[in-house]
Image: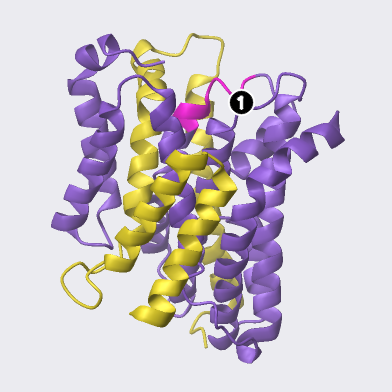
Chain colours: A purple, B yellow
Amino acid sequence: MKLKALKAAFPYTIPIFAGFWFLALAYGIYMNVSGFSFWYPFLMSITIFGGSLEFVAVSMLLAPFAPLQTFIMALLVQARHLFYGISMLDKYKNMGWKKFYLIFAMCDESFSINYTAEIPEDVDRGWFYFWVSLLNQSYWVSGALIGGLTGSLLKFNTAGLDFVMTAMFVVIFMEQWMKQKKHHTGLIGIGCTALCLYFFGSTSFMVPAMILIIVILLAFRKPLEEGGLQ
Amino acid sequence: MSPMTLPQQIMTIALCVIATMLTRFLPFLVFSGKKETPQTVQYLGKALPLAVFGMLVVYCLKNVSFLSGSHGIPELAAIAVTILIHKWKRQMLLSIAAGTVCYMFLIQIIF
């Protein structure tokens, strides 16, 4: 049962392997050249397991101690996970002991795969979710560790490889788009986020974007529900 | 080097962990009791995902400058390739690989 779920889950995680290794290596190297031992990227990638915050945390560690600012900044960077939780309430129900790990390790990529993947009938859903989450985290942690150990010894001629993440979210967006009869919510997501990026700039657009998405989804609840959400 | 003492560093990292876990666990803690999940939250659970995937696509492009440099042409071209290949074959890995290779080619060789 476990092995079968692993076989079903692995192919979904291949693009994540490419993207995570690239980004996590870069993160480990960044910590190394900033003067931190490999223990930092290693332990931080296990415990935080959220790429963008881990990068931000490097600059926090290089600045004077500011606990309140750190906490608020971290909440703002990670706020989008609230949306993932709300979307996964049903899927992660009755997962037993796995549920804790599934929520703990729910990064952008694991959420996206676990929400959209077409899991075959004869594969155990819990184990499928579990393997996707665990494989993704192991890619990230190993990349961060290797980057932290080797530092700038590694030479990059892989410019642009990080686009694998963008391409993956485009494909996942399309898959979800094709599954739904009406596509207004997708356009709301893109429109609100692009609008906020334009007005608030790339460092502080996410929270306003999330608020705007919620407000618009609630304001147009009736037509959207009648339009046929699954 | 970090200007902090080791305990201060540990606290900084711990605060990042706590904030992250708060955002991941909160919906499950609030809505997983014996009470039924409120209608509004159930509705959001259905309406949010496609909006969130759209949000994530824009999020990936947040550092693309459309007014200077390469004007976002490599990004938009590579996204177009990803979409077309995916419409054509509908195989996730193939579409992702094609888009990424296209992007790497564009920024390494052309732009």
Q: Chain of mark 1?
A: A
Instruction: Tell me the residue at 55%/75% (across/down).
Output: A26
Q: Was residue A90 drawn as part of the magenta stretch in this picture?
A: yes
* Quadrant containing the N terminus of chain A in the rendered view: top right
Residue A54 spot, x, y in % from top left? 51, 64
Instruction: Tell me the residue at 83%/33% (across/down).
Output: A4
* Quadrant containing the C terminus of chain A in the rendered view: top left
The answer to whether residue A143 shows anywhere in this view is: yes
From the image, tell me which residue sits under label 1.
A92
Judge from the rendering whether residue A204 lies leftward or rightward of residue A144; answer left or right. Answer: left
Residue A111 spot, x, y in % from top left? 54, 39
- Residue situated furthest front in the rendering: B88
Amino acid type, callout 1 = Tyr
Vertically, is A8 above or below B8? above
Determine which quarter of the picture holds residue B45: top left
SS state under label 1: loop
The answer to whether residue A35 shows anywhere in this view is: no
Vertically, is A103 above or below A141? above
Instruction: Tell me the residue at 39%/73% (across/down).
Output: B106
Over which residues does the magenta segment extend?
Answer: A85-93
